[in-house]
Amino acid sequence: MALVYMFLVSSGLLMVVHCQNQDSVIAFQTISSCKNGSNPSDIVEYFNAATLSCVKCGANFTVQQKSADGLACVCKEGYRYVSNFGGSQVMCERCPGAVSDDGWECVSCAASANSTSTGQCSVCPSDAVSALRQLNGNYVSGTSPPEVTCLTCNASTQPNAKGDRCERCSVTLSIRNATCSCTSTESKAKGICFSTSSTGGEAPVLPPDSPSLYAIPLVNGNTFQGSDYLIQNVRGDYALCRTYKSVTACQSLANMCVLFWYRGMDTAAATNPTPCSLFQQISGPDFVSLKPPIIVTVDADNEIVNDELKTQWTVDPIMRFPFRVGQFSLEGEFEGYKDITGGLLQLCKAEDNVLDAAYNFGTYYSQSCSISATSLRDPAKYPLKFFEVYLEYTGASGSKNIYRIPVKILNFIDSRGTRVNQQTLRDWKLTRRFFLVDSLSTRSGSDKDAAYVRYAKNIKLVVQLQEGSADGHINIPYFEIEYDDVSKDLALSGTKVQVSFSVSYSMSQSTYVRNFQIATGTLSSLSVLYAGYRTYVWSKRAGRLTIDFPTLINFIFYLCGALSNCFFVIVFGVAFYFFIFYKRQNIYFLAHPEGQAFEEWLALFGAAFALKALALLHMIVMQSSADIFLIDWERPAGQSELIGDSEKQPVKKVGGSVSIWRTYFVANEWNEIQTKRKINRVFQIFAVLFFLVVVGFEDTTTKDPDGTVNKGPDVYMSAQSPVYRMALASLVYLLVAVVQAIFFVFVYERFISDDIREFVDLCSMSNVSVFIMAHAEFGYYIHGRSVHGRSDVNLKEMFEMLSREEKDLVGQRGLVPNTEQQTFSMALPKRLRQKYETVYMPVQLETASAASRGGPGRGREKSIEAYGILNKFLCAFIDHSLRDIDYVVKERSFIEKILDTEFLELTDKGIFYNDNGHSFDNVLFYGNEFMLIIFDTLLFCIVDLIFMDYVLAGVVTYIITQVICWIRDMTGRKNLVKKTLVDERFLI
């Protein structure tokens, strides 16, 4: 029993599941799948939208057939409806004669309306209408079956479009004769007969026919011939407007002129007429109140540049343009004033707050989107309407007025074939009416779809401040419109079109451009003088008495550095000025730099970066080519120090030796500090990005007066300004760098670690001095001679020496007795340089020759020998042991410190100038932090200018600065090996 129960339950479940599957899974059928009974053996089916399947009609193919849309059954020709409830619920019966037009009655046909093979009465003549019933519902004939009769329309009437009733020949004009047919001297237009002759001294009412009246202009310079709408209306509206003073006809003719993009408006010639030339022919005092002023008759500069608007515009509190839009139908009917908000003139769709932000005064607005060309062809979504924009304002007398806002159509071509609206202001031809989408004018013939859709590709509202005004007064704003078109074939292929709407603000830049150019010229001249002075100092230190090629090359690079600094000051100063004052203004007086002003600023910005890059390259080359030698003061145990002239008194060799590891250790430390900087580059990038992106300072760089940080998602954000982004990025980058440098110099180096001074201490403990010749006759010296006389000792001796030094039981570390001064800048005598090159050059030649032969053995021996000679020579020089080469130690004068030069001419004695302990870092990155920070700032800003992305700019800046450090480290390492004669294998 249990098994039977389980079987029944399971069977029930299976049946339920099966039923559910039947509801969910059906065979796929379409309307075309249903049979239409074309063959006698076929049944007739219609598509049931409820079951999504084909269903059989109630009768066979001889009585019923599938409807045109395939969704119902209908009676065939010769059959009338008995009942019709849709679908298959249709009953039909055969009519012995004909069937009425509505398909419900069997009728007979009068002699004037004989029945046809289709089972219906024939079409009546052109001057008659088909009649079955009277207006009260009674049959016309009174016979059975009722008879369909053709009734001739009486005088002054004609059949309507459906042919079922008579109507007046024209609802506009009174009829001049007893018939609706035009005479031989008349022609029909808009369903009205107009005179085409000049008989009786009267000018013809209807203008001559011409193909140019119907040639719709397209963007590529071609035209679309044969517009149905223009063929039917343009000549008639001209006649109605000019002869009969029809207001609607005048408006309609004006709209057709707008459809022509105003071509022909600058001429009233009869040859090759256009709707605009016909519109211009209508003139005189009688038409002042009839003809809409869609064309601006005064010069463009007088129309735009005037002080008619007395409103003082402010951005705090923010003001909104009080625009009103007059809307007109294609037929010329005025449809009332519309509010410009809500995207009335914007093809792109968005939230109302985004669309309406375009009319917030002072907001640079830009919105673009892609629209399917197919959707533009839909007149329900994009109806053909015509617009005029008016600005409400208060006149001088206090009255409330509206100003017709002019429009500049970029596609306008004058009678000479010139696009004058793309030239200077004085050449512009301004208008007032425009349309957004036209999907009607290019319809022709039997094709009900437009061959082209013309649309407003770019719409721009231009606002200009009055020149010389700082009290918020503006010139007349105007719209700038560029049209484009898309063909039917492209639309059907799925093409999308790009449209945009923008608002821009500008001001007279003449004063700014003049001041900008003066500042650039003045500072550039000073830069040339400064570069000349730095070249003079270099040539003096390099021992070059004449202007030769290396001098000119160095002048160019010094000029690059000086110009880049002055350009950066100008670029940053201008950007910072506009950024601060634009965001903080109440009454609008300052606009974002545009046109020539922006282009010159951009060019100077790029030049500053390029020149700074060249200056940085020059600095790296100079640092990586400086002559460096490590002087080892250590002597073998029991050997006395060198006394006398080493050239005449060779040193006697002893059995002891000196360890080279101290020299290698100093060389490694020098190699490590070559790229040391006063800022941490990783922290610098993270800190800058934190303030710009995380805190949200980036939001203040938009082209609108709103300077708030972290704007909400419901607030429209204008486009980012390259000028404001550069100002903010430079400010934040420099501030973070300055704070880092101050902390590093006054806190970190003082209380934690000072690598530069520690290197000097290391030299003293290693008994090694560093002799740097940055130029041929100028360099830096770090005195590292140990006060204990030796450093090659064991651990116990080292602790003892440090203890004695702490207890002040030994002399001081300075070069001059009883002083602590260990670092100097040196002006060197020529003989020392000559002696250095005498020893050094053969080694380099031998090393290069050995490298080319693939064997370093001989070159290495020469290097060891030269190292010993140079070490002894420089030791003797420092110890004043050379009779013809000596030096003195002195302080720089105040002027020399300020100008960074040496005024004294050298003879046989060099000069060691006391410094602040950091002069030698001029050959390191550490001493050139200012140049590096300016380069980093310019690099960060130039990358952001290209990509408009602070995060990407930070990443790229870090990578490039890392590469620069790697290049400096690599070239510095090679130079250290080459000049100190230290084996590269021992550099870590």
Image (cartoon, rainbow, N blue to C red):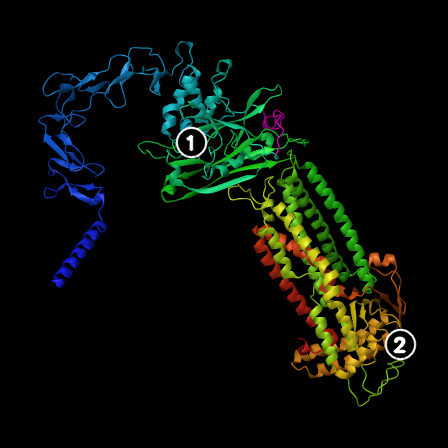
Q: Nearer the viewer, mark 1 or mark 2?
A: 2
The residue that mark 2 highlights is 882
Q: Secondary structure at mark 2?
A: loop
Label 1, label 2: how far apart the Cα atoms are: 99 Å
Relative to 276, say whether 963 is above or below. Answer: below
Which of the pair 983/271 is nearer the observer? 983
- Residue pushed farthest top? 200
Report x, y in % for residue 280. Answer: 49, 21
Q: Which residues are magenta?
A: 298-314
Per the image, label 1 sits on a secondary structure element best described as strand
The main secondary structure of the magenta stretch is: loop
Residue 897 in the image: x percent, y percent?
84, 59
Q: Residue at x 73, y 56 (%)?
A: 556
Q: Which mark is residue 262?
A: none
Look at the picture and state if 664 lies above or below 913.
Answer: below
**Sequence-wise first label, 1 or 2:** 1
Which mark is drawn over residue 216?
1
| Image quarter in which the C terminus is found | bottom right
